[in-house]
Amino acid sequence: MSATQFIELIINGLITGSIYALVGSGIALVYGTTRVLNFAHGELMMLAGYGVLLFAVTLGWPVLLAALATILIVMLLGAVIQRVTIAPLLKREDWAFNVVAATIGLSIFLQSAAQLIWGEQFQGVPYFFNGVAVIGEVRMPWQRIAIFLVALGVMGLCALVLYRTRLGRIIRATAQDAEAALAVGIPSGLVHTAVFAISAALAGTGAILLSPLVTVSPWMGASYLLKGFAVVILGGLGSFGGAVAAGFLLGLIESFSVAFVSTEWSNVVAFLFLIAVIWARPEGLFAGRGA
């Protein structure tokens, strides 16, 4: 393997990992705050894919405006899902199983609704950024570079909100002890809704960045949901930073497995690594001592 091929593998792994990190960090944020695993998270990605297809392609809006409109709509959907579907179930004693069943049912419903509305055909979105960046002997499309840079910026902004703002302190307080937070006047219900909206925004951003590279379809989010859960387990359940780090790690593992094994076996290698981590360190690679 030449130095150029090695660098390209690293770059491709980081780009793929940035999408996994976006998806996984949203799942981790919801679980860390509410202890809820949202199995409809992938369908929020799918809806965001159709949203950017509608605004940017069908209606011809500028890319930035189409992306902002899509993210706002997906955030609203995430908030509605939490208030209508999740919040009533959290009041029950057996809420954990009920929430899993409800979100799986919602996932199936949204996939079926997408098939009825848009059909089963796969649809493409043109590149937002054309051209190829050339650095020495390394060539990389600007679209893929933009994916990495935008994803990194969005996750950095989310981390800044979580650890440097009042809203972030409220979210972290609710995650640590929702009842104690409620006792000091923090509306935990609204915090849970806000977290679902932020998680939906992360999923929507991932879908928008991916849409020019993969086809938009009713099943678009299914594989990324699985990778998102893998990232959450690798990073440590509920750890936002752990999910981000695990996302990049998983992307690098897949990139190098394609080079040394084959594309068809990349998912097998990734999940074998996940199983090995679960055996050796069940709390996750980047979990804290209290995990």
Image (cartoon, helix red, strand yellow):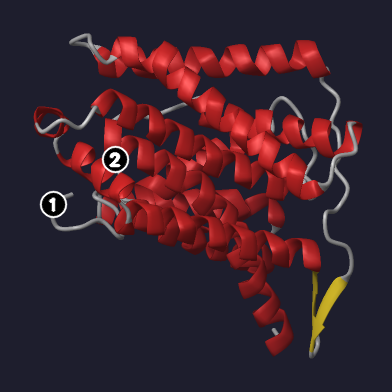
Which image quadrant is residue 2 in?
bottom right
Quadrant in the picture for the N terminus: bottom right
For marks 2 and 1, the one nearer the N-term is 2
Q: Nearer the viewer, mark 2 or mark 1?
A: 2
Residue 190 drawn at (x, y percent) = 33, 26
Numbered mark located on residue 290 in the image: 1
Residue 41 drawn at (x, y percent) = 52, 31
Q: Does residue 261 appear in the picture of this structure?
A: no
Q: For the residues labelled 2 and 1, say whether their Cβ atoms are less than 8 Å apart.
A: no
Q: Is residue 161 left or right of residue 290?
A: right
Between 265 and 285, the one lying in front of the other is 285
Which image quadrant is residue 224 in?
top right
Q: Does residue 168 appear in the picture of this structure?
A: yes
Q: Which element type, helix, strand or loop, lies under badge 1?
A: loop
Q: Residue at x 28, y 41 (%)?
A: 171
On screen, 126 above or below 77?
A: below
Residue 53 drawn at (x, y percent) = 81, 35
Numbered mark located on residue 8 in the image: none
On screen, 239 above or below 136?
A: above
Give the amino acid type for the residue marked by disc 2 in the picture.
Answer: Gly
Numbered mark located on residue 32 in the image: 2
Give the amino acid type for the residue marked by disc 1 in the picture.
Answer: Gly
